[in-house]
Amino acid sequence: MARPNPNKQVVELNRTSLYWGLLLIFVLAVLFSSYIFN
């Protein structure tokens, strides 16, 4: 049973893209708030 489970790879890929999306939203929120308050 050394064969990797494709389901697990899909879950990890979705989790990574979710983290990148949250990071992108956080950066945009910081830039937008600094643009507003200046």
Image: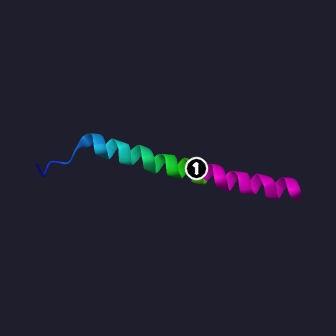
State yes or no: residue 4 in magenta: no
Relative placement, left or right, of 24 versus 16 is right
Q: Residue furthest right?
A: 38
Q: How many marks?
A: 1
The residue positioned 73% from the left and 57% from the top of the image is: 30
Image location (x, y in percent) of residue 11: 36, 43
The residue positioned 79% from the left and 54% from the top of the image is: 33
Span highlighted in magenta in the image: 24-38
Relative placement, left or right, of 10 versus 27 is left
Name the image colouring.
rainbow
State yes or no: residue 35 in magenta: yes
The residue positioned 64% from the left and 49% from the top of the image is: 25
The residue tagged 1 is 22
The amino acid beneath tag 1 is Leu
Image location (x, y in percent) of residue 26: 65, 53
- Circle 1 — which element? helix
Q: Quadrant of the C terminus?
A: bottom right
Image location (x, y in percent) of residue 8: 30, 45
Query: From the viewer's perspective, is residue 37 above or below residue 3?
Result: below
- Main SS of the magenta part reads helix
Relative placement, left or right, of 28 versus 20 is right
Q: Residue furthest top?
A: 7
Relative placement, left or right, of 36 versus 32 is right
Instruction: Rate crowding at label 1 as few (under 14), some (14 to 19) or many (20 or more) other CA atoms within 10 Å.
Output: few
The residue positioned 42% from the left and 43% from the top of the image is: 14
